[in-house]
Amino acid sequence: MKDWSYIGLLTASWLLAILFVNPIGDFPLNDDFSYARSTMNLSEAGILRYDPWLSMTLLAQVLWGTAFCKLFGFSFTVLRYSTLVLGWVSVIAGYQLVRDLGQGRQVAFLLAAMLAFNPLFFSLSFTYMTDVPYFAFSLLSVLFYVRFFKEEDLKWMLLGSCFAMVSVFVRQLGLLLPVAFAVAYLCRYGLRPKYLLTAFGPLAVIVAMFAWYSNWLAASQGLPEGYGSFQRLLRQMGKGFWSQIPLRLGVISVYLGGFLLPFAVLFFPSLRNGFSVKNNWPALLGVLAAAAMGVLAWPRLPWANILYNLGLGPKLLKDGYFFINMQPVAPKWVVNILIFIGLCGAMAAVFLLMKNAKQRLINGGANRSIAIFSSTCALLYGGFLMLDVHCFDRYFIVLLPFLLPLLLPEGQQNPSPKTRWAATAALLLMAIFSITATHDYLAWNRARWQALDFLTKEKNITPDRIDGGFEFNGWYRPTQQKEQNGPKSDWWVVDDEYVVTFGNMDGYKKMSSFPYTRWLPPGVDSVFVLKR
């Protein structure tokens, strides 16, 4: 099979998964009500006016979504498809990155599929959240910067810098890409004057554009309260910050270990030949550190936001917010087995990373530059994860394109058939979970919005009398206040006379129910309308 055949197979798999999940539904998911409103303002009114619920630059995503809305009309379904396109772009770019790093087609296919069916990446591809657009543009930037270091052709540097700039205009964190490029370039060529322009030129242009945009935003609309900045991150370095670092590192390690399990299964057996403790003691110390931090994080897993006990979400209804009616859930022993698997994957990944990154650094040339670039990206982004007040699990996936050049060994690998089958089995299990859990997430949201249409359209209940969940209240915004108010949910609720829930709640009586079919585990559930 040629490269185009594997790319076609990846594309067919992506389209088939979309068909299974069914992304259709004119409703927001998670925070994307805010990004959708900003896009609607531009696509329908022709005004670049952002929703106040904003913490990132967002401009590139708004322009991307607007292009789709101009072609097909504004709806959440259209915006969801715009993200699915970028999800596909990410998968193909991931395949090409692995090929550019010297691996064969079968390995590149397996690793690109591992990315496609990563539970967080796959689920977020069915939303209009910023995670997948930022991931896609960052991955394209990494791909072209890697090509530049291999071929020293300026066109790849320009393309890498262009996509870095686009990523900055989705999230400010895209700035780390030209910084990492400058570091790697100067480490290769030194501080001689003739190299300074190439090293710092992309960074200077991108920083200037970002500064201009931020000043324009401040002057025209005012910077939102949650708008991210370097100063805001530094303010987190107060009391309790340093004690949180081992916990967060442990959480990230276990998550990435689970995500990289097919990779670890594919490559770890190749280390048996010629292995010695003497030559690999730094990597073994890294494994022990990963194990210790993973054990420390164990009681806090699963972490927060997208991935929960037995599904993908988040389930942002009132009873879900107060941890009531969170069914179905897996037994604790099942959760512990999954955490243990993630911890084993983390230890294997740390060993591979330290061993293969060390080899790239020793060999010099393009491989050394790629290792320095990737390491700098990973360290800078890891610093953000240590400082960010939220540190949601969905932020972890951005580390994958930064770590991949460090994890892959030099030279084309030919894993044995048994190893490939084992890696494929791990990948299939991941894909089954991702598809079924994402299907269920969309299914219960369709039922939720049927319930809300019943209240608002059939019963003519105004949004200020309804707690319809985070997305409903965020979209209609019956009040501008978002604060905890006694037993009310923490999302713009004026009066929760009517609530949409997963089950019964004290002080409420059931008005109606709206069933939906779930796949994980197979069965039928319902969303309920309750009245106080």
Image (cartoon, rainbow, N blue to C red):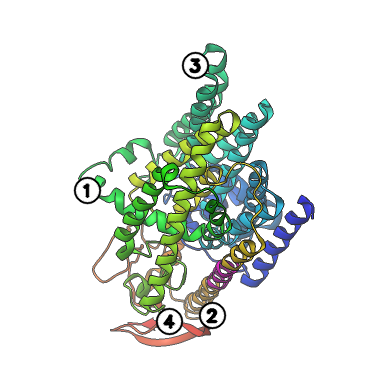
Give the label, 2 or 3, closer to the camera: 3
Give the label, 4 or 3, closer to the camera: 3
Image vertical order of residue 430 relative to residue 55, above or below: below
Prevailing secondary structure class for the magenta stretch in the rendered image: helix
- Residue drawn at x 32%, y 57% is 481
Give the mark, 2 or 3, whose residue is nearer the N terminus: 3
Q: Crowding near pointer 3: few (<14 within 10 Å), some, many (20+)?
A: few
Give the label, 3 or 1, closer to the camera: 3
Query: What separation in Å lies between label 2 and label 4 (alpha carbons)?
Result: 19 Å
Query: What separation in Å lies between label 3 and label 1 (alpha carbons)?
Result: 39 Å
Residue 60, how many percent across, how many down? 57, 43
Q: Crowding near pointer 4: few (<14 within 10 Å), some, many (20+)?
A: many
Query: What separation in Å lies between label 2 and label 1 (alpha carbons)?
Result: 41 Å
Give the mark, 4 or 3, whose residue is nearer the N terminus: 3
In this rendering, does residue 162 appear at all?
yes
The residue labelled by disc 1 is 240
Asked if marks 2 and 1 touch (Cβ < 8 Å), the reply is no
Residue 509, how many percent across, how many down? 35, 87
Residue 388, how many percent across, how many down? 35, 47
Q: How many marks?
A: 4
Q: Crowding near pointer 1: few (<14 within 10 Å), some, many (20+)?
A: few
Which disc is residue 529 wearing? 4
- Residue drawn at x 32%, y 59% is 297
Query: What separation in Å lies between label 4 and label 3 (alpha carbons)?
Result: 66 Å
The residue labelled by disc 2 is 518
Q: Which residues are magenta?
A: 428-439
In the rendered structure, which amino acid carries the disc numbered 3? Leu
In the rendered structure, which amino acid carries the disc numbered 4? Val
Residue 466 vs residue 213, the one in the foreground: 213
